[in-house]
RNA sequence: GGCGCGAUGGCAGAGUGGUUAUGCAGCGGCCUGCAAAGCCGUGGACGUCGGUUCGAUUCCGGCUCGCGCCUCCA
């Protein structure tokens, strides 16, 4: 029985889908004006894991992760680069897909681009206007009247009074309330035609928050099961989504809200604005993508995750232990859910996707496999790993990837060393081994011959 | 200032009202020509002060410290 920590109620709840056997899930994706950093990587990996576990549990899942391809920063960046919005966003969407694929993130079922749903956004705004939640401000922007929505603040645990007290002095041109947010931004003369759409409120473009309300509704309906995203989106983005979607439909919007924790650098949130971010592609130049995925999944999705070389090295060594246990087994992944390890794995995953505990089970399984050499355990280790998107490679491939010398070169030296060993010329044998070690190649003598792996 | 989250052994990171997390690193042993890998064993922990309890790292409260949101942000 799956339990999910619901940000809306701040408690662990039994998961019950709206439609039996079926899960509809929406996750806020990226604004594509730059390369994804590791924080974005975490969102993608975490909700990929969630989707995989839901499917492994027998649900049919429809997973939507949107792309924000129209926004202030995109416009600004395109102008700086002297390229069109379309060209810029296409470029970074392609890069995002490369990064996601490298991290073993399966493509979502739908990946809507905001610009393709502008008509849906306008429909939604029109309904909000009709229901009395939207108004045209003095500067011609269409705004959402926050005070009209009684449940505003429920998700973020903030009252309007608290928010007002804490809000920095903000020049809210024409807004009825400083906390009101923009649904439709009136076009400005200096903006390129590419970012102007005709609308009942004049030419302009959608506000950020309405995008997700429109896309989720278009693809998943007015009421769906799970909505996810980074913790920083809880307020105001997700709060605003609720206000918009429920204000328009008069129905509950989402049953379970999930928020993943931040990636940190030196105990500070990794973010564009702080400038302390590492892009996924930079990290992948130095670490195997599966090591990065393992590193992300080794922490609980709601906990902060500190990024550092030492932690990546640690993850690399740990993952190598798992692959080492698998060495020599070419089993087809197969899970016997009645087997003790598999049951523990399931229990962990059902407990709010406790991947650290699930991975601990994998290590116990590796230990049992090392002792017994039972191919069934190898099949299970690979099977359970597969649910997390791990351990699907040939173990030799993992253990040898990134070697500084060619296979033939290494094999030649191993042959030379084997000769030396036969002649009991230990000095020469050790010299060759040391030489390879200096090149990052570790030799291991086994009863059936010498094997190698990269350090 | 308001709201929220967290504080676990050298590092990372789960979990539990009384009994082993797990991984990396360390130490001892087995194996090995010696190693490596693996196996066996082992030391070392629950921020602080109170409370509840037969018993708390685990529940409750104060404090301290850290982080986040309150502004675009995954």
Image (tube, coloured by chain):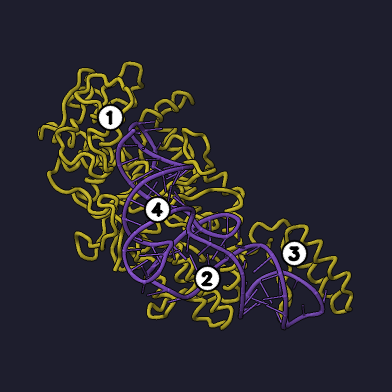
Of A383 and B32, the residue lying toward us: B32
The residue depicted at 49 percent of the width and 34 percent of the height is A274
Q: Which circle marks residue A408 in the picture?
A: 3
Looking at the rendered structure, whether the residues under marks 1 and 2 are on a common chain is answered as: yes
Of A433 and A66, the residue lying toward us: A433
- CA–CA distance between discs 3 and 1? 70 Å
Label 4 with label 3: CB-CB less than 8 Å: no
Of A203 and A250, the residue lying toward us: A250
Residue at the top extreme? Answer: A189
Using the image, name the chain to which the residue with label 4 belongs: A
With respect to residue A78, does A396 lie above or below? below
The x and y percentages for residue A384 are 45, 70
- CA–CA distance between discs 2 and 4? 22 Å
Looking at the rendered structure, whether the residues under marks 2 and 4 are on a common chain is answered as: yes
The x and y percentages for residue A433 are 80, 66
Label 3 with label 1: CB-CB less than 8 Å: no
Q: Between tags 1 and 4, which lies in front?
A: 1
The residue depicted at 80 percent of the width and 72 percent of the height is A415
| Residue picked out by circle 4 | A302
- Using the rendered image of the protein, determine whether residue A36 is visible from the camera's viewpoint: no
Looking at the image, residue B18 sits to the left or right of residue B39; the answer is: left
| Residue picked out by circle 2 | A363
Using the image, name the chain to which the residue with label 3 belongs: A
Using the image, name the chain to which the residue with label 2 belongs: A
């Amino acid at each position: 029985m799956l339990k999910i920590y619901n940000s809306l109620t701040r408690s662990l709840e039994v998961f019950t889908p709206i439609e039996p056997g079926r899960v509809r899930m929406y996750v806020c994706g990226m604004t594509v004006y730059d390369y994804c950093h590791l924080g974005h990587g975490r969102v993608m990996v975490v909700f990929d894991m969630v989707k995989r576990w839901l499917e492994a549990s027998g649900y049919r899942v429809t997973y939507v992760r949107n792309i924000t391809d129209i926004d202030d920063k995109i416009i600004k960046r395109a102008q700086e680069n002297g390229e069109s919005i379309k060209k810029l966003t296409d470029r970074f969407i392609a890069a995002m897909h490369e990064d996601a694929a490298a991290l073993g993130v399966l493509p979502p079922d739908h990946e809507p681009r905001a610009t393709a749903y502008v008509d849906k956004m306008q429909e939604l705004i029109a309904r909000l206007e009709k229901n009395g939640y939207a108004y045209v401000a003095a500067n011609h922007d269409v705004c959402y009247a926050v005070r009209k929505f009684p449940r505003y603040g429920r998700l973020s645990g903030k009252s309007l009074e608290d928010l007002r007290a804490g809000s920095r002095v903000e020049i809210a041109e024409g807004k009825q309330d400083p906390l009101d947010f923009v649904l439709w931004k009136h076009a400005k003369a200096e903006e390129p035609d590419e970012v102007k759409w005709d609308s009942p409120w004049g030419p302009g473009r959608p506000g950020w928050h309405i995008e997700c309300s429109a896309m989720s509704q278009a693809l998943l309906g007015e009421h769906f099961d799970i909505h996810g995203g980074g913790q920083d989106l809880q307020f105001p983005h997700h709060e605003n989504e609720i206000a918009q979607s429920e204000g328009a439909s008069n129905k509950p919007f989402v049953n379970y809200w999930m928020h993943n924790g931040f990636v940190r650098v030196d105990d500070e949130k990794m973010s564009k604005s702080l400038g302390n971010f590492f892009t996924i592609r930079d990290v992948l130049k130095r670490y195997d993508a599966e090591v990065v995925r393992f590193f992300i999944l080794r922490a609980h999705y709601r906990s902060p995750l500190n990024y550092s070389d030492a932690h990546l090295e640690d993850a690399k060594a740990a993952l190598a232990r798992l692959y080492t246990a698998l060495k020599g087994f070419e089993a087809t992944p197969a899970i016997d859910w009645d087997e003790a390890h598999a049951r523990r794995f399931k229990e962990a995953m059902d407990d709010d996707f406790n991947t650290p505990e699930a991975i601990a089970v994998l290590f116990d399984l590796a230990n049992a496999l090392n002792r017994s050499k039972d191919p069934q355990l190898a099949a299970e280790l690979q099977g359970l790993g597969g649910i997390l998107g791990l351990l699907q490679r040939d173990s030799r491939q993992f253990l040898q990837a990134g070697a500084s010398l060619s296979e033939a070169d290494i094999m030649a030296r191993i042959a030379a060393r084997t000769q030396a060993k036969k002649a009991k010329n230990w000095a020469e044998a050790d010299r060759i081994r040391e030489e390879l070690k200096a090149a990052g190649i570790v030799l291991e003598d086994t009863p059936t011959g010498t094997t190698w792996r990269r350090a």
